[in-house]
Image (cartoon, rainbow, N blue to C red):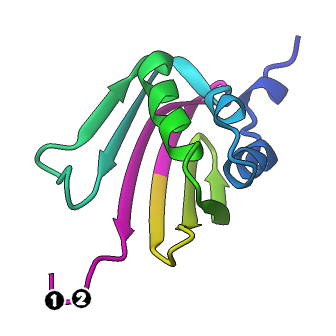
Amino acid sequence: MGTAASSTFDTEALRRGIEGQDATALLSLYADDAEVRVVDHKTQPSHPMVMHGRGEISAMLNDVYSRDMTHKLEQVVVQGDQVAYTESCLYPDGVRVLAGSMMSLRDGKIVEQTMLQAWDEEEGG
């Protein structure tokens, strides 16, 4: 049994999951005990939204990828057990979202992810 294959992160699965809006496929990339932190203008660095385990992460992924919007994996870099990527999103009304993630891996699965996201807001608000 080789360990090299099991520790490789599947960037194409990440791309297919994001661009195909497939929350189930994306969830398969996470370890059972994974933790995801999301920072944006509502959940600021002092009080990020934190999800523990695949159950909580699944709920978030199902919410995000069930929305009427397009998702595109812009860039992805893998170095050892670290992955970084940017994702751009577009709602039908033209509102754009940009998210950047940094992830730590164990045996090729995501164990920690920090996501920073920003979206278009109304002018003057």
What residue sits 55% from the left and 56% below the top? 84
The residue at which mark 2 appears reads as 123
Q: Amino acid at mark 2?
A: Glu
Q: Outermost residue, front direction? A: 93
Q: Quadrant of the C terminus?
A: bottom left
Q: Outermost residue, left direction? A: 46
Q: In the rendered image of this protein, does residue 123 appear above or below residue 69? A: below
Q: Report the side of 100 relative to 73 (left or right).
A: left
Q: On residue 29, which mark appears?
A: none
| Residue nearer the viewer, 75 or 97 | 97
Measured as percent of width and height from the top left, residue 33 is found at 46, 16
Q: Outermost residue, bottom direction? A: 124
Measured as percent of width and height from the top left, residue 15 is found at 74, 52
Q: Amino acid at mark 1?
A: Gly
Q: Residues within 10 Å of mark 2 (few under 14, many from 20)?
A: few
Tag 2 and tag 1, C-beta contact below 8 Å: yes
Q: Report the side of 74 relative to 37 (left or right).
A: right
Instruction: State the CA–CA distance, disc 2 to disc 1.
Output: 4 Å
Q: Outermost residue, right direction? A: 1
Q: In the rendered image of this protein, does residue 11 appear above or below residue 93? A: above
In reply to whether residue 105 is colored magenta, the answer given is yes
Q: In the rendered image of this protein, does residue 36 appear above or below residue 18? A: above
Measured as percent of width and height from the top left, residue 105 is found at 56, 34
| Residue nearer the viewer, 70 or 107 | 70
Secondary structure under the numbered disc 1 in the rendered image: loop
What residue sits 36% from the left and 76% below the top? 120
What residue sits 20% from the left and 49% below the top? 43
Q: On residue 124, which mark appears?
A: 1
Magenta region, residue range: 102-125
